[in-house]
């Protein structure tokens, strides 16, 4: 198949909200998988089921030597057409990790819709709750990967298909272990979240920016994962830790994670969470990992002095080192897939961050959001040698 990207500038520049540009450059180191010390391990539980509500689309990806100048024609050095969309990417990651996945969404009736569904079905994902809207186009994104700077630029065209609450079939929740939301289809997501809450099913919410219905979803989420900007912008904070504190002060989530690109991630959780507290007391050896998380509490003692008691636990985790960065598209979605897997298998918070960082690192070794996603059979020995079966939430 032959395809080309033609970027047409409007009034001298593309709309800012359609472009995103991130840079990741990190060194390489491998963990030691031959640890002789026996550890209790979390078995790969293939009976787990995650229901995701959110976006599914198609990505047209071109890798170029250097991002083009205006009015310039260049050739790609590598190209790919893959499925995309936050929720669909995260569920694909989970399927490859051996977790059953159900996607609840609505797409168009165009040529892309069949490609979207066929790719998900090749991953053995349950697509029976995906609806199509006649006459609507599916979401698609042009992704230009700049090999010179290790950045990627996304030009997204959203779908006009919107899943309503009336269209949601709640049978999707039968046997569910966890619900994942990416903020799209807010009325449908709210209905699923409300019924999940009634059934005691935990909810993970992926937050990138303000969206319709976000307040309602934040009020129901058990775990919140954001990008680097959201904690600062949502409450108008100048400090990221203050933004995370505000999120935990305002909503009932057990923890909030902010992903920071090449700087790794930071987790903030409640000190009064008895299960998480017990997890932190578990003795384990982290010497086989090439990264080391740093734990503290918040407010920091220097800020708190003697006038207040810290409320939150903070873990700063570097990103997992890799040999080379091919494409960061979908790295955050893969990271969330790793977090969900760790929640389902009761990893400690530190192990959870290590695991998710490794999953994201595997992804960025290949072009597109899905090609580099790891398969469970390639990780089982590593999981067995390094991860502890201790409660963490």
Image (spheres, rainbow, N blue to C red):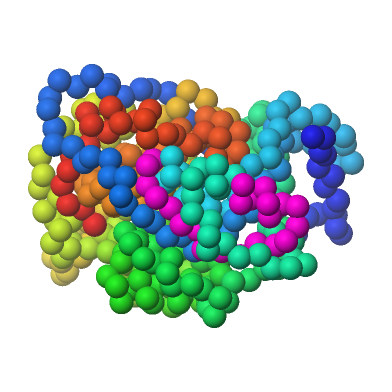
Q: Position of residue 392 (x, y in %)?
A: 21, 53
Residue 114 is left or right of residue 34, and the answer is: right
Residue 236 appears in the picture as rendered: no
The quadrant of the image that shows the C terminus is: bottom left
Residue 248 lies, in percent from the top left, at 31, 68
Asked if residue 325 is among those painted magenta in the image, a careful observer would answer no
Q: Residue at x 71, y 43 (%)?
A: 60
How many numbered discs?
0
Task: Give the x, y percent position of residue 156.
Answer: 69, 55
Asked whether 168 or 288 is in front, the reply is 168
The residue at 62%/47% (across/down) is 118
Which residues make up the magenta segment?
A: 97-118
Locate the N terminus and report the quarter of the image it occupies: top right
Residue 14 in view of the camera: yes
Left or right? Give the position of 289 relative to 29: left
In the figure, residue 235 lies in which quadrant?
Answer: bottom left
As displayed, is residue 102 above or below residue 264? below
Q: Residue at x 10, y 48 (%)?
A: 281
């Amino acid at each position: 198949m032959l395809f080309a990207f033609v970027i047409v500038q409007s009034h001298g520049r593309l709309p800012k909200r359609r472009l995103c540009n991130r840079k990741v450059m990190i060194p390489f180191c491998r963990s030691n998988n031959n640890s002789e010390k026996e550890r209790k391990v979390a078995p790969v539980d293939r009976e787990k089921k995650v229901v995701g509500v959110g976006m599914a689309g198609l990505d047209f990806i071109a890798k170029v030597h250097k991002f083009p100048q205006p009015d310039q024609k260049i050739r790609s050095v590598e190209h790919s057409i893959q499925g995309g969309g936050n929720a669909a990417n995260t569920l694909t990651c989970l399927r490859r990790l051996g977790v059953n996945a159900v996607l609840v969404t609505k797409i168009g009736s165009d040529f892309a819709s069949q490609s979207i569904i066929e790719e998900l079905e090749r991953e053995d994902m349950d697509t029976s709750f995906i609806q199509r809207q006649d006459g609507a186009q599916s979401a698609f994104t042009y992704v230009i990967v700049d090999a010179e700077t290790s950045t990627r630029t996304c030009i997204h065209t959203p779908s006009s298909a919107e899943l309503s609450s009336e269209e949601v079939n709640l049978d999707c929740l039968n046997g569910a272990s966890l619900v994942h939301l990416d903020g799209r289809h807010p009325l449908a997501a709210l209905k699923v979240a409300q019924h999940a809450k009634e059934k005691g099913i935990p909810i993970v919410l992926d937050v990138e920016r303000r969206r319709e219905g976000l307040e309602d979803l934040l009020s129901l989420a058990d775990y919140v994962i954001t990008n680097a900007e959201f904690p600062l912008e949502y409450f108008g904070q100048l400090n990221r830790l203050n933004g995370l504190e505000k999120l935990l002060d305002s909503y009932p989530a057990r923890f909030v994670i902010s992903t920071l690109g090449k700087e790794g991630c930071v987790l903030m959780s409640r000190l009064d969470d008895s299960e998480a507290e017990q997890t932190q007391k578990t003795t384990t050896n982290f010497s086989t990992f090439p990264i080391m998380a740093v734990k503290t509490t918040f407010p920091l003692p220097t800020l708190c002095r003697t006038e207040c008691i810290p409320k939150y636990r903070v873990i700063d985790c570097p990103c997992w080192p890799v040999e080379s960065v091919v494409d960061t598209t979908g790295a955050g979605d893969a990271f969330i897939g790793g977090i969900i897997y760790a929640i389902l298998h009761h990893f400690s918070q530190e192990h959870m961050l290590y695991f998710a960082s490794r999953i994201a690192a595997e992804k960025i070794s290949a072009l597109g959001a899905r090609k580099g996603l790891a398969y469970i059979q390639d990780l089982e020995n590593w999981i067995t040698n390094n991860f502890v079966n201790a409660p963490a939430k």
